[in-house]
Image: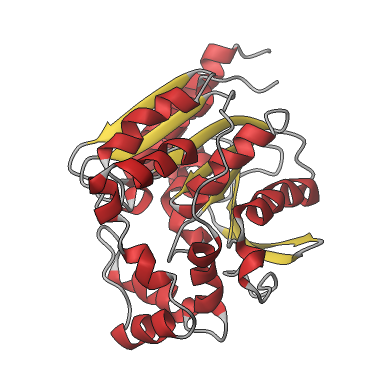
Amino acid sequence: MAISHSRRVLIKLIAAGAAVLGLAGCTTAAEPSQITPLRISTAAGTFDAVAAGPLDGRKVLLLHGFPELGIEWEHQLRALAAAGYRAVAPDQRGYSPGVRPTGVENYRLDHAVGDVVAMADSLGWKQFDLVGHDWGAAVSWVAAARHPDRIRTLTAVSVPHLGAFAEALRSDPAQKEASKYMDMFRQPSPVPEDKILASGPPKLPGVSPERSAEYFQRLSQPGALTAALNWYRANDFRGYEQRVAVPTLFIASTKDAMVAPSGVQATKNWVTGPYRLENLEGIGHNIPEEAPAVTNSHLLAHLASVPAR
């Protein structure tokens, strides 16, 4: 019997709610929200990733930020899988040992955007939904603008459209102050690397000490932290003024110490398609980990509002 689109949406939202409440294991299927490792081969090298959900489910690619890894999206992977989606979260270039080129120029956003398409091609995905946080959001804004034929929807978390963000960096004293940490990250190697590694695992608001230690351990591997910092050295956020036409959800937060309100509010001017801003009260920069339930709810509702085609 055929199932209507509205009924499919309802089924997905109910399943997602069960995942948030820890009830996904009550289903008769074999652990629908189980997270498994995955390797994605591309011309640039092989990306490490984590994945969840049925192979024939609607495809979702999730991109992490600094200093996280793909497992940043653990809660979202489980919720998406429980709702029937196939969700994949790669460790981006520099974070994956198999894609860790030397040279600052290899960490321009253009390369990371190319990685998105290359990974989708390797996975056999003709069309997919794209989700990104922090640097992953920066990549996602550009990818969605350039590849509307491949990317069905965009969900950007924390970081505004780069046109709005670059303008805030130029003209908003609050954003200039919030971004001062980038000056330290952009110093020549090994100056920031030595400072970061000497400080031990970072205290990331909303992130468990165990997960923070995992990020730190991975970035302590030879060349990993330099590669991650090269994202800052290679990019000033200018030159990405193309508007986004795909349906877009922007999840921001009112206590983000790294993003001033001006860029958040101006992002609507850079989206020509359907657009919604969810500005979470009292939440910091690490939204997917600090506020997983509300992130999952907004993400699943956004995906369900745009039918697959």
Residue reaching furthest to the front = 171
Res. 22 in view: no
Q: Nearer the viewer, residue 181 or 172?
A: 172
Q: Nearer the viewer, residue 84 or 151?
A: 151
Residue reaching furthest to the left = 282
* Residue 188 in picture, x, y percent from top left: 48, 79
Q: Residue at x 66, y 65 (%)?
A: 106
* Residue 262 in picture, x, y percent from top left: 29, 35
Relative to 142, say whether 188 is above or below: below
* Residue 258 in picture, x, y percent from top left: 30, 53
Relative to 261, say whether 234 is above or below: below
Q: Quadrant of residue 36?
A: bottom right
Q: Residue at x 43, y 75 (%)?
A: 187
Relative to 84, say whether 119 is above or below: below
Q: Quadrant of the C terminus?
A: top right
Res. 106 in view: yes
Name the colour scheme.
secondary structure
Q: Residue at x 48, y 63 (%)?
A: 232
Q: Quadrant of the N terminus?
A: top right
Q: Residue at x 45, y 29 (%)?
A: 249
> Does residue 19 appear left or right of residue 223 in this picture?
left
Relative to 306, say whether 126 is above or below: below
Q: Nearer the viewer, residue 65 or 7?
A: 65
Question: In this figure, what is the number of numbered marks?
Answer: 0
* Residue 54 in picture, x, y percent from top left: 65, 43
